[in-house]
Image (cartoon, rainbow, N blue to C red):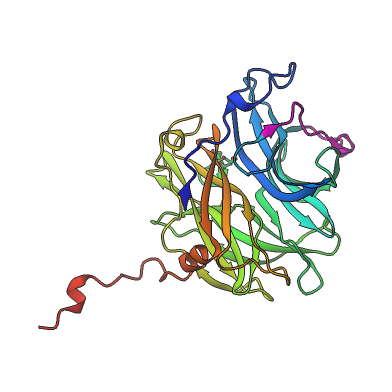
Amino acid sequence: MRRHPRNPILTRADIPDVPPLLHDVTSVFNPGAVERVDTTARLITLLLRVQDRSRETYIVPAHSQDGISFEVAPRIVEFKGLEKLGKRVYHIYDARITRLDGAYYILFAMDMDDGCQLGLGRTADFREFEFLGRVSDEDIRNGVLFPEKIGGSYLRLDRPNKARHVDGPTSGSTIWLSESDDLLTWRPVAPLIDGRFHYWDEFIGSGPPPVKTRQGWLHIYHGVAGHFGSSNIYQAGAVLLDLRDPTKVLGRCRRNILEPREIYELAGQVPNVVFPSGMIVETIDRDGFAEPGSPVRVYYGAADTCVGLAETTIAELLAACAESEIGVRLPFPSDFRTT
Ligand code: BMA
């Protein structure tokens, strides 16, 4: 993917200073993204993760007509009904937005006393937000909803968390497919892809919600390479799933499609991180499929500090998914010797 020349497109300086909550914030990153029509204007809306000096985390909306310059709302998102959970939620973060059944659904991570859980919210207009419920009962993160029912069920991708070391931080190396009849109660269907140890994506998690193409569901995910268990390098990659049966993996990129290279990705609160979380496809055909030549914008968190924008096309992402499997040696020029 290619970085936008105006990167990073959002930094802490873009967040309105509105005490007491939005005051002198530390960072803005990992945005969910959606394109929509608001009254008459086409807008790209982001739900930003904003963190302050107390390390409290808020979701803050931002809107743009060109997808590059964003106006950040001077208020945090309050999910009505969250208090009914009756349990303490320390942080809400990493919102992923899916348009489904005519509304916008938001899956997000909730740090609670029993680990990280998934919360589900809904909005019609990005002004009022409603909390629909806690939609997990195990430590889990990176939930993303498919934009339509498949085989009569709602589907999502999610990533259960496991501790790598006893009492250590949790992460995960398997993305699962789960299904639901009502969006509230979920059943695991099948593991979809595993982390590839020794390579760039040892630990993995979903990025933005999957996009429908004629070739299959195109999905961007993040992969983490652990360097001697000390530093983690977060990169982005792509995978292609069968349209009718998304448990079938049709292709997966061999090499990452974005990795930390620029200074704002290499240095920050958490160094060496690109974390894709929002994806906007410009051209969708009449039947709802992304067109191969369509420009694609991917919004990502950089070093847990600011927001970057990377550009590509559907065709380029599909080509990445068609690369030969990792670990299969590519031919060296010497393999073609004729003598
Ligand atoms: C992941 C999540 C992300 C974060 C990333 C890098 O596990 O917590 O929200 O951006 O780590 O710190």
Residue drawn at x 70%, y 22% as measured from the top left: 22
Q: Tell me which image quadrant ligand 1 sits in.
A: top right
Q: Quadrant of residue 243?
A: bottom right
Please tell me whether residue 75 belongs to the stretch shown in magenta. yes
Outermost bottom residue = 338
Observer-nearest residue: 257 or 178? 257
Q: Quadrant of residue 16?
A: top right
Give the x, y percent position of residue 308.
53, 40
Above/below status of 65 relative to 240? above
Residue 71 in view, yes or no: yes
Give the x, y percent position of residue 297.
58, 51
Residue 194 in view, yes or no: no
Image quadrant containing the C terminus: bottom left
Above/below status of 170 relative to 219? above
Judged left or right of residue 305, residue 83 is right
Residue drawn at x 74%, y 16% as measured from the top left: 19
Please tell me whether residue 140 belongs to the stretch shown in magenta. no
Observer-nearest residue: 230 or 297? 297
Q: Give the extent of the magenta segment.
A: 71-88
